Amino acid sequence: MNQKNSVILVGMPGAGKSTLGVMLAKELGLDFLDTDVSIQVHEGRTLQDIMDAEGYMKLREIEEIVLLKTDASGKVISTGGSAVYSDAGMKHLKAQGTVVFLDVTLDELRRRIHNFDTRGIARRPDQSFEELFEERCALYNKYADIRFDCNGKTPVEILAMITSELAV
């Protein structure tokens, strides 16, 4: 692997960050951490419960605190889809590892996500999935060291692409 000993996965909800993160961690012999789970453990409640009680901006605030406390060394990290809204959090993670953007089309995400309104996705109440997608993709591209087109590919195929690129 390159000079950094960790991998940070970014992308939309439904892009496969958690699934691929576990597979990649096994393949590379690294620990795995899902920052959405870290937020829930930190708060003792689900992402959706946080948003229902205090709003999406509070969730993003908590997410930044968790990201800044995260030691990414020797880990594959699956970030929440909204992690890229925290410049400080992303700079912290990027300093410790290679940021990989799992890019999936809007149509494919629509097929994969059936619980948009209850999944705990940090967004403005009036924001459509399309608007969220456009806004976030610009941020994913901003922070990514490597981008993978994951459309029409199985998790095993994507894993092979990532491990091949990281071996360079």
Image (cartoon, grey):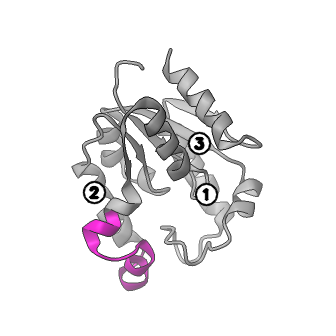
The residue type indicated by label 3 comes to Leu
Residue 3 vs 10, above or below: the answer is: above
First reached walking from the N terminus: tag 2 or tag 3: 2
Check disc 2 and report its element: helix, strand or loop: helix
Check disc 3 and report its element: helix, strand or loop: strand
Front-most of 122 and 80?
80
Residue numbers of the magenta segment: 39-55
Front-most of 76 and 53?
76
Check disc 1 and report its element: helix, strand or loop: loop
Q: CA distance from mark 2 to mark 3?
A: 22 Å
Residue 122 vs 45, above or below: the answer is: above
The reply to whether residue 56 is in sight is yes
| Left or right: 54, with 106 as reference point | left
Quarter of image, res 150: top right
| Left or right: 79, with 121 as reference point | left
Label 2 environment density (alpha carbons within 10 Å; few <14, some 14–19, many ≥20): some
The reply to whether residue 61 is in sight is no
Quadrant occupied by the N terminus: top left
The reply to whether discs 2 and 3 touch (Cβ–Cβ < 8 Å) is no
Residue 75 vs 165, above or below: the answer is: below
Label 3 environment density (alpha carbons within 10 Å; few <14, some 14–19, many ≥20): many
> Could you say where residue 139 lies in the image, as x and y percent from the top left?
51, 46
> Could you say where residue 96 lies in the image, as x and y percent from the top left?
30, 33
The reply to whether discs 1 and 2 touch (Cβ–Cβ < 8 Å) is no
Residue marked by disc 3: 102
The residue type indicated by label 1 comes to Gly
> Could you say where residue 80 lies in the image, as x and y percent from the top left?
45, 56
The reply to whether discs 3 and 1 touch (Cβ–Cβ < 8 Å) is no
Residue marked by disc 1: 14
The residue type indicated by label 2 comes to Val
First reached walking from the N terminus: tag 1 or tag 2: 1
Q: Which mark is residue 66?
A: 2
